[in-house]
């Protein structure tokens, strides 16, 4: 499965959770389902989970969602001033 098979909505949703591993991401998505009440959002969650379950770990890492866990600390290292 290629990353482009995920919709923009699915990618955006997945990026707000722990993307360090496929299993962690699926677990967090499932856990958060209890707080989702909008039908459209439930469809996005269900679709994302279904697609993730079909991916191998290697395919998951090819998507590059793990980059969502890397945050800039706010320091500008280029300006020493």
Image (cartoon, rainbow, N blue to C red):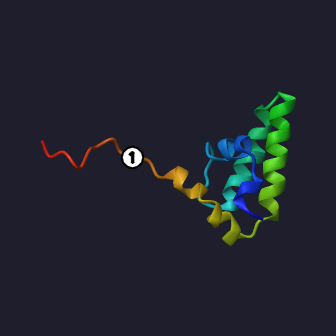
In the picture shown, does residue 56 fall above or below 29? below
- Residue 24: x, y in percent? 67, 56
Give the labeled residue for mark 1: 72
Instruction: Report whether 54 appears left or right of 80.
Output: right
Is residue 17 shown left or right of residue 34?
Answer: left
Q: Residue at x 76, y 32 (%)?
A: 35
Residue placed most toward the observer, 33 or 42: 42
Position of 24 relative to 34 (above/below): below
Q: Residue furthest front?
A: 4
Indicate the quadrant containing the C terminus: top left, top right, bottom left or bottom right: top left
Residue 43 position, x and y percent, is: 85, 39
Quarter in which the N terminus is drawn: bottom right
Rendering coords of residue 13 (x, y %): 69, 42
Instruction: Pick the residue in front: 49 or 59.
Output: 59
Kind of element beneath mark 1: loop
> Callout 1: 10 Å neighbours few (<14), some, many (20+)?
few
Q: Name the quadrant containing residue 65.
A: bottom right
Residue name at image x 22 percent, y 49 percent:
78
Establish if 43 lies above or below 23. above
Q: Is residue 74 left or right of residue 35?
A: left
Instruction: Give the image location of residue 37, x and y in percent.
Output: 83, 28
């Amino acid at each position: 499965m290629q990353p482009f098979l995920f919709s923009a909505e699915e990618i955006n949703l997945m990026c707000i959770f722990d993307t360090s591993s496929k299993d962690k991401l699926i677990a967090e998505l499932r856990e958060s389902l209890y707080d989702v009440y909008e039908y459209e959002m439930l469809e996005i969650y269900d679709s994302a989970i279904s697609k993730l379950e079909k991916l191998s770990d290697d395919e998951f890492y090819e998507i590059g969602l793990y980059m969502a866990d890397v945050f800039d600390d706010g320091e500008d290292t280029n300006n020493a001033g």
